[in-house]
Structure formats: structure tokens, C-alpha cells
Amino acid sequence: MSITFKKSVAVLTDQVTVEEAETLLEWLLKNPSGKVNLSDLDHLHTANLQVLMALKPTVSVWPKNTDTKLWLEAAMNP
Amino acid sequence: MNALLQQFIQESREGLEAISSTLLEMERAPGDTAAMGELFRLVHTLKGNSGLFGFPALTRVLHAGEDVMDAVRNGELSFSQTLADQLLNMADYVSVFLDEVEQNGEPGEAFQTPPRELVTALRAWLESGERTTETPPAISTSVAALPVPAWTEDLPEEVRQAVAGMLREGLSVFRVEYQPASDCFFQGTDPLHLVRQLPAILWRRISPLQPWAPTAELDAYQCNLRIELVLSTREEELAEHFRYVSDQVTWEAVSLAAIVQEPQSSPVVTSALSAVDPLVMDIVRTQQVALSACLAQPWLSGQQAAIVRTLGNALSGHDMLLQYFQQSLDEANRQASSTPLMAWLQAELEASASEAGEVHEECSLARDIAGEWPSAQLEPSVAAMQGVSEAVPVAAESASARRQDDTGHVTPKVLKIEQEKIDRLMNLIGEIVVAKNGLPYLAERAENQYGQRDLAREIKAQYAVVNRIAEDLQDAIMQVRMMPVSFVLQRFPRLVRDIARKLGKKVNLVLEGEDTEADKSMIEALADPLVHIVRNSMDHGLELPEERVKAGKPETGTLRIRANQNADHVVITIEDDGRGIDPQRIKGKVASKGLVEHAALEAMNDQELINLVFLPGFSTAEQISDLSGRGVGMDVVRSGIEKVGGQMRLSSQVGKGTQLSLTLPLSMAVTQVMVIESGGQRFGIPMDQVMETVRLPKASIHTIKHQPTAQLRGRTIPLKSLNQMLAVSQEQILNEDDEYALMVLRSRGELVGLIIDDFHGSIDIILKPMVGILGELSGYSGTAVMGDGSILMILNPTELFE
């Protein structure tokens, strides 16, 4: 699993695969004020991106990977 | 060029011919639904085939054509002569494309990108057609076709500068819009991953296609995104990059004018157009309607040229407007499509309608642009435009001339012959083979009955000559029908790759003996079963990489398809090094489904258990997958192979892998049969099933569990009486030594003894399958005509024993 769910933060690391989108969605629904930490994220499958776009959780840390950051910003801060 | 590509070109040419003739037929009878269906099928087949070879341009054009035909077929679009023209243009493009591929083995530079004007023209039909039922078709058509330029406004200034810089350097910049299919995640596509692979992206935006559903109903696996990009690349690269999702991606070249000026364009335009004489406005509006009516025509048709001329004249008194008009015209000329012009007109008119009266100062930016479009640039295009009206009919003429030319003298390198004719030739040759068998009898009679020894010798000599020629003939006709196995094997590398990706497995496909040849009908009969077997192997046989590593195997599985010739048979072996078939699991499965009685199951050995996968109604997959769990079981595969006289053998070792071998006769034309007699009738039994013929003393038959059996070379063989099976009430005849005539036959890998009355020799026959009511009779594979004109029924022991 490349998503670690802490109390109020979901930490997404490395590659987040398509299977994890469901879990991420469920977690965000259960924790409406939950934040996401994308610091060590390299790539996330589009399904996950969609979940983030739809539920707009607060991003506590943006990705260090600049390309990943660019894409996430392009999707989440239109 | 490989054989598959050659076949594709040949088939596509046939398809094109059929498309042309069907189109012409439809022009004569536009309401002919059968012809419409046929046309759709033809275009659909062509498209499907083109996808096999990775010709994105071709696929895209055909896809557009297919959609149009689908709309026509469903009555959403009415068929017209102009539509037929468009479809013929499409056929022409495909034909030129095929020529190119045939000459160079692959499409050249010019054929890497789909022909924009053709695709847009085809798609335009769809858009206008969809709206024919609604009111003002002209206006709404253009709305759908409008490339709303909102994105340019959202471009940050630095991106705008960068794009402008690149354009001035002569680099091409594209704006790409990718709307992934909503079920794309299930097809293994990761749109974000796909676009991330693109180089030199200047700007990007991802937005929802439709408003997000309420959070509770949100489906993470329903893609609802629009991905927009601005990047500097070559169009061919875009086409190549998005070749698998070409129907979901659109792109347009970004022009300098669009990037620098458009944010301000609408206010400027408003002021410009609202200051214009209402009469001129009216003319412009009329032209817009006229243009939308001929959107589908190839740029620049006579009608379009006339519209352009009228617009030019009407706007001649308004410098700013004329200049914008000129810019959109240039773009239209560049793209060879009326869409940019249409878009401009639409934007102008809308702006003037909604914001009439608002007067804006011309901004400095717009003036800058005006400076960048010196009149020197405009003049040539005006001149070109004036020349165009004369040039158009000529171009159209030459196009139609070319079309006639194409059908006029085609010089085929390969002679195409209908299979029927070959079949007839083969039947005739077969008859010679059988008829010549009468000559030795004649020689015998000449000698014994009439005492003509010399004549008999001469007849025999003649027979030898006829025999040699007949055999050569038979050989030659076989050669005509022979095809290399590679014809079916070639599709597998791609298939295996795609399936492997879908399943997340690593597979190395090894093909061996691709040039082994067999009869065309055999090769064709092989295609479907092979695909099914390979899918099965990949789905159920080979494990996931992690599982393989855990089992101490290399991460990448090996799938080997080997073809070789063994006497007069082709043997195809499909081998994987996957998890193998577990006989105990099969046993449990069969028991739970109640397919076989419990006691019988217990008595089976491992091999017999494995063979149970051939039982109708058996499927080992726990889950119905979209790959092999479609309800087509191994029983169907086996009966497909057996229908053409083949056999299938399955062996497997748990943890080591599975091996399936298909044995097929090289050709079905001439079959060797053993003639036997039973109940006073003669029958033929295919020689390749006959293992041996023995005389069996009556005393050595033992009955075990009501089943007569005999010990033969240490094996217990079940015995069946042919008379009994055919419901003939006579007992089988014993010879003077109280022995039965017994034929040991191999049926599905097992030996069965068939008791008959007497043996006769073996002969070559041409097997004719039975037709009509008789065709449904099981137990017989067909009939043959004997040398003396009598009919011989050929038995199918496998069916008989079932």
C-alpha cells in the first residue's frame, strides 16, 4: 500500500495504484476534514486524482517531485 | 513485407471495392437498409483490421466513417449524394494509404497523421445529422463545431510568451484536449500517466467533464475528466502517442494570432461589428448560414469560395473586421477546413448580438498584432483566394478522374481466385485420383478374362503415367491451398502483449516453426481455438510475477507456440510454464457440478481427471473474467478441432506448466479410409484412427461390468459391436476359426475395439460431408463415391462411441 492513513492525514507515497482509489475515497468520506500529505508522491493513478479533485481535501504538503506537483496543481487549483 | 500485412492489404482492397459498389448501389436506392448494414459492416471490418497494424491515421479516418455509417444505419442521418462523395473520398484515402504501405512496407511521413479535413468533414456530418431533427440546423451545427477559445484566456502570461516565442521560432505548438472514456480505468488506461509521458508541456489543466456527483454517490472508477495541454511537439508524435485512445483525443495547432490576441478579441470584435451597417450584418449572417450548410464539403469548394468572396466584399469597408476575417481564412486554408472560418463568424455574430452597443477602445495589444500582419502577407492569400474559384472545379475533376482511373486498370500481382473454383478443381482432381483406380482392374480383366496379356501390360503402363500425373496434380492443388502457420500465429505477439498488460503478468512469447505449411481451411479452422487456448494459458496458467518469484520461477513466464510437420500432420503445441492443472481441483469442481458420477471420478487417474476440462459445462475460473471466461469452454475448442479431423491432447504438471498439442491433417481433400464390412454393408473408417486390425478368438472376450472387453498386448480394451451400435439386428459374423474381425481404433486418446464382419483394403477417397437432414446425423463424417460408382458411408468412430 502506498497510502498510509494516519489519524487525520493520508500520506500518499511513491506510486499510488488504481486499486487504492476506492480506499482513499472511503477514508475521505469518513474523515471529511482529513488532509492529504503528498510529499513523497511520484505518481498517482488518475482514479485517485479524481477522488482528490472531487472531495478537495486540504493538501498539507505538496509533492517534492516538481512534475507531479505541476500536474496536481493543474488539477486541484484550476 | 510480412504475410499478414499482405493479407490485410488484399482484404482491404476487396473491402474498398465492396464499399464503392455498395455506395453506388445506395445512391440508386437510398432506402436500402440491407446495403446500409453491409456498408457499415465493411467499414467496421476495415477499421478493426487497421487497428492490428498500428496505423493510427487510417484507423481514425475509418472510425469517423464508421460513426457516420452507424448514424445512417440507425436513421439518425439521411443518406445523400454529398455524403456518398465524402465516403468515397474516405475510400480514396484508404486506397492511397494502402498503395503507400504496399510500396514501402509502412506508411510514410505524410500518412502518419490523420487527414484532418477528411475526419472533420466526416464528423461534421455526424454533428449536423444529429441536429437535423431540431430547429435551425445551421446555427446549432456551428455551435457544436466551435472550438471555444476559453483556454487561451486562462493561459498565464509567461506561458503565453513562451508559446509566442516558440511559434516565432517556427516550432509547432499544439493544444490537446483529452477526454478519457468513462470506463477507461477498466481498460487498464491511466490517462494521467499517458499524458505525463509527453515531453515539453507548456501548460496543463485537468477539470471535471461534468459536475461531480454528490460525495456519497461518487464513483472513483468512472472517469469524469478533461485533460488539456499546450505543448510543443510534432503532430505525428501526438498521433503516435495517443494511438490507442485516438477517438478520445483532439488537438489543434496553436496560431500566433490565437495566442496573443484572443483574450481581447471579443470586445474588439464587438465594437467592430456593432459599428457595422445592419445590412452588412445581415449579409454576414446569411453567409454564415450558407457556410454551415456546406461545412462538410472539402475545402475549398466552389460554394465555399463564393461565400468567402462575398464576405470579403461585404467587409471591405471595415479594416479591422477584414483583417480578422483574413486571419481566420488563412487558418482555414492551412487546415483545409471551413471550421476556423465558421468559428470566427460564430464568435463575431454572438458577440455582436449579446454585447451590442458596448464600445471598447482598441487595446494596444490588438494594435501590436495588427502590426504583425503586414499587408504583404495578406495579398498572396487574397490572390490565392481569387485563383481558387477557378482551380476548384479542376481539382474536383482530377479527383473523379483518378477514381475512374483506379477502377479502370488495376494490375494485380496476385491472382485472386474464389475458393469455390479451387474447390471444384480439387474435387475434379480427386475424382481422377479415384477414377484411375479402375485401370488396374481393367488390366486384370483383360488378362484373365480375355487372355490379352500384352494389352494388360499396356494398360498398366498407361496407368502408371496417369497415376503419376494425377499425383502431381493433387500435389499442385494442395500447394495452391497451402499457407504458412504464421498466418494465424502472427497475431499472437500483439494479443499476448495486450493480455499480459491487462492482467499485469509478464509473458515472453516464443513462436517456433512459423513457416510450417498446412491447408488453408486447416489454418483458418485453427485461428479461433488457438486464440482461446492462448487466452486460457495466460489467464489461468501463467501466474502473476510475485507468485512466480515465490514459487522460485523467473518472474517472466514463457508461452511457447510451436508448429511442426509430422508425416502428414501438422502438430501445434502450446506450452506454458505456469501453475499447471491440479487434477484434485478438477475433481472437486466436477464433483460439485455433478458432471460425472462420484464412483467414476474416484476411479480416474490424474490424466483422466485433467481431461475432464473438455467436459461441456466445465470452467475452472472462479470468476468470470473478460478474457477467457466468456462461456466458451474447452469442449467447444476441442469440437472445433475435431470437426476438421484434428485431435487435441492435454498434459499438465502441477507447478510446472501445461502443454496442449493439436494435431491436424495437412489437408482435408483426400482421406485414406479403411473399407470394412458389417451387416452386409460396406463402410469406411478414417485410416488415421485405425491402430490395428486383429482377429480375436470369441473365447477371449470377457465381460466386465456388462462391458465386453479383451486383453490385447497387456491392455484391457473395451469392445463394441458395430452392428449393435448401428442398430442392425444381425450378430457379427465369425470366421471359420471362430474369430471376430476386430479393429482397434484410437478415439480421443483412448483405444476402443470395434467388432465388424470383415476387412477390405484401404483406399483414397474424397470425403463429402453430408448435407440437409442427413447432416445432423451423428456417427458419420460423410460419404464418398467409389471407383465403381457406389457410395461408401464414412463412419466417425469418435462420435459413434459417445
Image (cartoon, coloured by chain):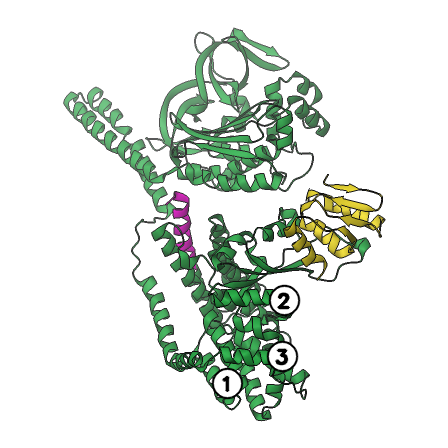
Q: Looking at numbered disc 2 in the image, what kind of residue is underneath it?
A: Leu
Residue type, mark 1 in image: Leu
Q: CA distance from mark 1 to mark 3?
A: 19 Å
* Residue B718, picture quadrant: top right
B518 relative to B75, above or below: above
Q: Which chain is green?
A: B
Q: Position of residue B703 (x, y in %)?
A: 60, 11
Q: Work out whether residue B290 can be spotted.
A: yes
Compare residues B84 and B160 and report the one nearer the observer.
Answer: B160
What is the magenta segment's predominant secondary structure?
helix
Query: Could you say which is closer to the camera, residue B738 or residue A67?
Result: A67
Of helix, strand and loop, which one carries label 2?
A: loop
Point 36% across, 26% down: residue: B763
Residue A38 horizontal/vertical position (percent): 73, 48
Task: Determine which residue is flagged by label 3.
Answer: B266
Residue sitting at x 49%, y 21% = B746
Task: Name the residue beneath numbered marker 2.
Answer: B155
Q: Nearer the viewer, mark 1 or mark 3?
A: 3
Using residue B188 as the reference point, say whether residue B252 is left or right of it: left
Q: How many marks?
A: 3
The range drawn in magenta is B1-18
Asked whether, in this view, residue B308 is left or right of residue B593, the answer is: left
Is residue B601 a member of the stretch shown in magenta? no
The hue used for chain A is yellow
Binning the other alpha carbons within 10 Å of mark 3 as few (below 14), some (14 to 19) or many (20 upward) gives some
Q: Which residue is mark 1?
A: B311
